[in-house]
Amino acid sequence: MTTEERLATLEREQAKTKAKLARLEKALDAQRQEVRARGFVLVDENGNTRAVLAMEKDEAGLFLWDETGKRRVGLNAGKDGPKLNLYNENGNLRATLCAEKDGSKLCLGDEGGYLRAALHVGADGSPGLDLYDGKRKGRVHLRVLPDATSLFAFYDQNDKVRLGLKLSAEGEARLDLFDQKANARVGLKVSVDGVPRLDLLDHSGMARASLCLLADEQPRILLGDQNGKIRASLRVLTDGATGLVLMNQNGYPCGSFRVSADGTPALILSDHNERTRAQLRVMPSGDPFFTLFDPNEKSGVELRVQSDGSTGLKLADQNGQERANLFILANGAPGLVLYNQHHNMRAKLVALADGQLSLELADQNGTSRAGLVVLANGASSLELADENGKPRASLVTLADGTPRLDLFDENGKGVFKAP
């Protein structure tokens, strides 16, 4: 090996050595920058502790003091997450900010260190706000649930909810008022379709009175019993008619009072099967009208007083067909009319105000076949007619007792007379 070759080899070895030394020096510098310890304390020029970085109960923490020796800041990272505490000049906790496993939270305290407000976001992402009184009693709670439902509640000094406001994800708004035992007593809501409703509840939570405005703008008042069954309903229809309905214990209507749009009042009574059995009306003319119905809701009895002073009582059969009519005319004359199942008059009896009495009998087609008249002066007459209603015989007794008989043919021409 020549001298030049040896020098070249030596230079290469020196370069490798320098590189190794440089790496070693760099490693030593890095080790000199790392300090391992259980804690560090910083003091001011008077030797007062102002900052501490240490392990406390297996948690790394940074704590800061003011010039009077009061702890003012605490920052630590534990197994549940990091936490920042801020203290006032008296050492009382005024604010805490933490990010833990179950969510993040900001807590604010008063001068005495009592918790007065807490803002938090749960692990499910739902935010909330809590406000507390001077005795650390929760008084106001605000929540937004994962389904976007919003809740707002007020509590009294005994931790009893007294007012609750809820807005569902679908858009239904509800306000609830509670008594001192946290029993809901008043509920006000506006449904998704815009229908407002006010409910008054008893101690068991049953709605006993409700006021609502239906989608068609019809106001309604509902009254319920202790079992939650609606027993009365007052309603105003869009046409101006009003109605009060009374229900039995099963919720079936059994009585109602209505005033129609034209001002006609009516009282309606029903049986337990919701079938109308009685009805009392005052017609627009002022005439009162009373009707009784059979189980099939067919009119059975009708009583009416007309504005001219006349009265009438009508009786019907099971088909609702009028079969009898008892009346008193405005002049005081009473009368009775009987009908067959086809509503053809079969008999008519009238006592006129002047003392005249009249009885008329008809066949099944309603054709008058016999007539008896007694005049006030004592005279009487009996007339018989054929199937066409034409008179065929007449028997008259005059007031002085004189009798007279007349017979007629089908054309009404007399064929016999006696005496």
Image (cartoon, rainbow, N blue to C red):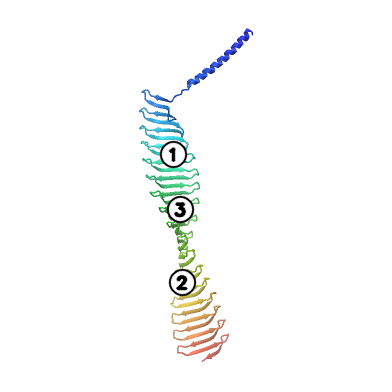
Q: What percent of the width, then of the height, locates residue 43?
A: 39, 24
- Residue type indicated by callout 3: Arg
Check disc 1 and report its element: helix, strand or loop. strand
Q: Are marks 2 and 3 in contact (CB under 8 Å)?
A: no
Compare marks 2 and 1 and give the one earlier in the sequence: 1
- Residue type indicated by callout 2: Leu
Mark 2–mark 3 distance (CA, rounded to whole Å)? 42 Å
Q: Is residue 94 visible?
A: yes
Numbered disc in front, either 2 or 1? 1
Residue at figure coordinates x 52%, y 89% from the top left: 405
Q: What percent of the width, then of the height, locates residue 57?
A: 42, 30
- Residue type indicated by callout 1: Leu
Q: Is residue 257 visible?
A: no
Please identify the quadrant where the N terminus is shown.
top right
Residue sitting at the far front: 57
Tell me if mark 1 has few (under 14), some (14-19) or many (20+) residues whose alpha carbon lies within 10 angstroms of its own: some
Numbered disc in front, either 3 or 1? 1
The disc at residue 197 is 3
Check disc 2 and report its element: helix, strand or loop. strand
The answer to which of 22 and 352 lies nearer the viewer is: 22
Q: Which residue is mark 2?
A: 303
Q: Which residue is mark 1?
A: 119
Q: Are marks 2 and 1 in contact (CB under 8 Å)?
A: no
Residue at figure coordinates x 39%, y 35% from the top left: 94
Residue sitting at the far right: 1
Residue at figure coordinates x 44%, y 39% from the top left: 119
Mark 2–mark 1 distance (CA, rounded to whole Å)? 74 Å
Compare marks 3 and 1 and give the one earlier in the sequence: 1
